[in-house]
Image: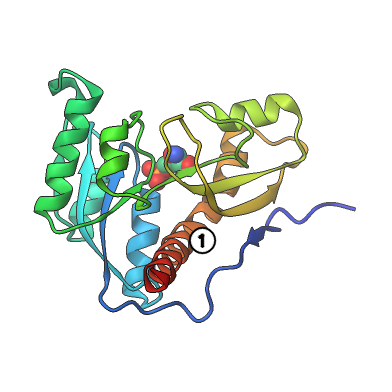
Amino acid sequence: MMLDPNLAIVSPPPPSPWPRFSEPLKLAVLASGHGSNLEAIATAITQGDLHAHIQVVIYNNPKAKVAERAERLGLPKVLLNHRHYPSREALDQAIIQTVQAHGANWVIMAGWMRCVTQVLIDAFPGQVLNIHPSLLPSFPGIHATEQALAAGVKLSGCTVHHVELKVDSGPIIIQAVVPVLPGDTADSLQARIQTQEHRIYPAAIALAASSKATESQGT
Ligand code: GRF
């Protein structure tokens, strides 16, 4: 029997109904590449699912496609070119200032290809999220899809997690599982995973914010 390529399991399931917060979540999205996850988050907001506002898009590579995408979506964007900062901490300080200057307090790493430091993590406790194209803790790092294929895994997927110092680690918020099919290439598997990334990232933001709201009610 052939596996359905569109089969995916998402756990926990996306919220239904989506939560409303006392005011829209104020997001800063950090991206280095194409920005398809940025667009998925923006779409979830305009559809009325994710109760949030993207205050600013921060990108680090002048040629990143995400800049054009932010422009098309009418989102404010700021280039923080990492080559212009003497250390990772200095870049993170600039990120903090930019996030705060735009009134955001959720840091959403969507293909942000820089290692962050404790400086950024401590500035927004519990509110720095990342997405990764594997079922963490398997295959952290930048070659996740290739490594999953090379290992011969039969299931792969994606993970949204709270960010800790170690790359691609931290408490997991949500995961989606997809099949690895015979004949898959890194590109075909990555495409299948990305379809699920676009489903789970908006859901993860809502789930993380709901947990945070529940925690603060309990204190
Ligand atoms: C995603 O696959 C994400 O998991 C990884 O980088 C990619 C970003 O894609 N961290 P895009 O720029 O959102 O299209």
Q: Residue furthest top?
A: 86
Q: Is 61 situated above or below 213?
A: above
Residue 20 picture location, percent across and down:
37, 79
Q: Quadrant of residue 106?
A: bottom left
**Residue 31 visible within the image:** no
Q: Is 56 situated above or below 203?
A: above
Name the residue at 63% across, 42% down: 135
Question: Which one is in front, 73 or 44?
Answer: 44
Residue 170 picture location, percent across and down:
50, 41
From the viewer's perspective, tell me whether residue 109 is left or right of residue 53: right
Q: Residue furthest right?
A: 1
Name the residue at 69% across, 36% down: 184
Which residue carries the number 1 mark? 199
Name the residue at 64% across, 60% down: 11
Name the residue at 31% across, 30% down: 117
Question: Which one is in front, 71 or 99?
Answer: 99
Q: Residue furthest left?
A: 101
From the viewer's perspective, tell me whether residue 213 is left or right of residue 76: right
Residue 63 picture location, percent across and down:
22, 32
Q: Residues within 10 Å of mark 1 (few under 14, many from 20)?
A: some
Q: Is 218 situated above or below 109?
A: below
Could you tell me which quadrant the C terminus lies in? Answer: bottom left
Q: Residue furthest front?
A: 219
Residue 18 picture location, percent across and down:
46, 77
Q: Is 91 situated above or below 111?
A: above
Q: Quadrant of ligand 1?
A: top left
Question: Which one is in front, 181 or 216?
Answer: 216
Q: Secondary structure at mark 1?
A: helix
What is the count of numbered marks? 1
**Residue 180 visible within the image:** yes
Instruction: Residue type at mark 1: give it.
Output: Arg
